[in-house]
Amino acid sequence: MSQEVDMTDSTWTRTLCAPLVFAMGVAGLTAPWPASAATDTIAAVPAAQCGPGSRPETGLQGQVPAADRISGRSKQGYACNMEMVGQHQGEGASIISAVAGHCAYIPTSYAGTRQKMQQGVQVIDVSDPGHPRWVKSLTTRAFQLGTWETMKANPAGTILAGAGVGLLFGADKLDLYDVSDCVNPRLLNKDASGLESQTVKNLAHEAEWSPDGRTYWTSSNAAGYLSAIDVSNPAKPATVYHGGSSIFLNHGMSFSADGTRMYLASMFPAGVVVLDVSDIQHRKAGSPRVRQISRLKWSDGSITQSTVPVTYQGKPYLIAVDEGGAQDVNGAIRFIDISDERAPVVASHIRLAIQAASNLATRRKDLAGDSIFSYDAHYCDVDRKTNPTALACGYFNAGIRVFNIVDPLRPREIAYFNPPAQTGRNAQLPGSDHAQAPAFGSLPGISPITGSLGLKVADLSADWCSSPPRFVNNQLWVSCSDNGFMVLRFTNGVYPIQ
């Protein structure tokens, strides 16, 4: 593995032209990368020790073996020190969900629009965690189209925002809902008709709120664009920045506590960028700028998805998650020391046994009937931002996994829950992005499924748990593409961590 820090002080203005960004981005993608042989020198994180009542994995840590997929064993799911309390499966779920108060908000797949009975975002009342219940669907402009990775509740949990993305990329659509009464969301940014949301200039694939809740940021995987939307008056949101980020392919983001630093994930090459966004945070008049403070790259992962800022006894770290792999390994979850924001450094990693380079052939066999994702994580969340004790992560194929991170240099696994596979139930799950995803092969013994477009689709022999798990009252509230919304609880005393 190699890593590189770039401290170029790049400045990007609102008037930056797309052709220039595109040219610079292509140059970056085609530039030679330092060679480093694929190795297994980073050991797998210590595995959870499963207590009574568990239903442990039958193969490697994180693996759903081909044999289990073919035999139907994966339909039982796998659990270690964790169990499901309640579920609302519905018609499946899109990429990420959100939580506010005692409610969950579950978006549904754009690709399944013609087959879905329930369109848009589903409001789920979780006041009784054992019996989550559907309340209504939100079908205004952005939510109807699909929010991909943009649907987030503000830090106060009172406003739910989502940009209209559809598949991968969208423009100018934004829905803002008052969720103070979480089962009765109220559209805030109404257009003249009073029935739809206003259009607001933005390019979106991902999004996040500033810590003070005044700004809703979207990032685009097109030409490195960021959009900052002032929502101080949520009835009249206004774009205050629409320009470059200093990299070509943006992904997820998080912020320093004062909102002046953005920690932006880079898709290619993998890594994170520290950006000074104080001009936007402080609403500087004129032409606000975004300035690059530093950039950290690595070569043993790809498509870095998300970042989570935490502190230990005042020392700041970022937790960064790769959505894809490289050099025959799956991507990693990395703890990055940002004590010196101009020279961030990777301090530790989390990888599962199945993710090792030596298990590449095994992964290919397991995933022959699935779609584009492997055994990679997508989003993680912590039980608290200051001196966190636990990290919960959602994985493609490997379920929900929880780690003891009391010592960020020595994380260890304490629990996991990989929900029952919904093998072959694609037609019943039109709201699941997984159920609509194209397959590139098949497993012997599992009949290929043809989707609505006449193409072979994923066999659903293991779920995609791509949404960030949320710690709520010592439970985890999660959503997975095929199993929908679930409430999980810990068993055998593994959490809270004493």
Image: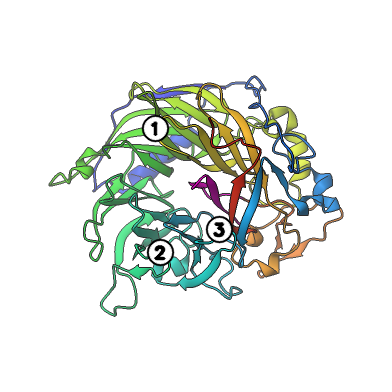
Label 1: few (<14), some (14–19) or many (≥20) C-alpha neighbours in 10 Å: some
Identify residue type, mark 3: Pro
235 in the magenta segment: no
Callout 1: helix, strand or loop?
A: loop
Q: Indicate how the structure is coloured in the image.
A: rainbow
- Name the image quarter holding the N terminus: top right
Q: Position of residue 186 (x, y in %)?
A: 34, 70
Near-viewer residue (121 or 240) = 121
Q: Position of residue 287 (x, y in %)?
A: 17, 45
Question: Image point 52% across, 35% down: which residue?
Answer: 390
Res. 182 mark: 2
Residue hosting label 3:
129
40 versus 452 height, above or below: above
Residue hosting label 1:
386
Q: Position of residue 495 (x, y in %)?
A: 57, 37
Instruction: Using the numbered discs, state the Cα–Cα distance from disc 2 to disc 3 in whole angstroms.
Output: 15 Å
Instruction: Using the numbered discs, state the Cα–Cα distance from disc 1 to disc 2 in whole angstroms.
Output: 27 Å
